[in-house]
Amino acid sequence: MMLCAGCSVEEMSSLRSLTKPYAGEYRCTALLLGGREWLGEGDSVTLTLTTDGTFAIEYRMGGAEGRCEGSYSLDPEGGGGVFCMQQDGKEARFAVVYEAGSISFQTPLCGKLLYITFSMP
């Protein structure tokens, strides 16, 4: 067994997790639809990015709960990326902005602009 800096190699993080430092759980800090804030007291929306390139968004809002999943790619140096998911048999792609530990995107929804920002706690 090799030891490095007082810990075993088996206990150290994998190279993959070290190369994707943005993987983890993010909390929604802004959810605007048509310029109106939709996050209320007790509501929560979380985004989880895994090291294998998949994501999950889970929400609890106004008594409703749900989850959506998909794949993603991020370029931390370039500050952008793409989230992909299946909706009604069609692929939906969202361009995202990655900056200072936050992920933001916007898309039209029901004739209004939906804007969401997730930040690491």
Image (cartoon, grey):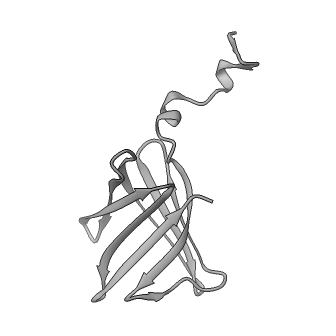
Say which of 19 and 58 sits in front: 19
Query: Above or below — where is 111 with respect to 6?
Result: below
**Residue at 41% of width from left, 66% of height from top?**
104
Q: Quadrant of residue 10?
A: top right
Q: Which percent across, then down, holds residue 34?
A: 37, 89
Q: Position of residue 11 (x, y in %)?
A: 68, 26
Spot the residue most to the right. 6
Q: How many marks?
A: 0
Residue ID at (44%, 56%): 99
Position of the N terminus, as image quadrant, is top right
Q: Tell which of 33 and 100 is nearer to you.
A: 100
Which image quarter holds the C terminus? Answer: bottom right
Of all residues, the one furthest to the top in this rendering is 1
Relative to 35, 49 lies left or right? right
| Residue at screen point 68% across, 10% down | 2
**Left or right of residue 96, residue 56 in this image:** right
Q: Quadrant of residue 70?
A: bottom left
The x, y position of residue 19, in whole percent, is 47, 35
Q: Hey, which quadrant is residue 61 in on the image?
A: bottom right
Up/down of 119 relative to 51, above or below: below
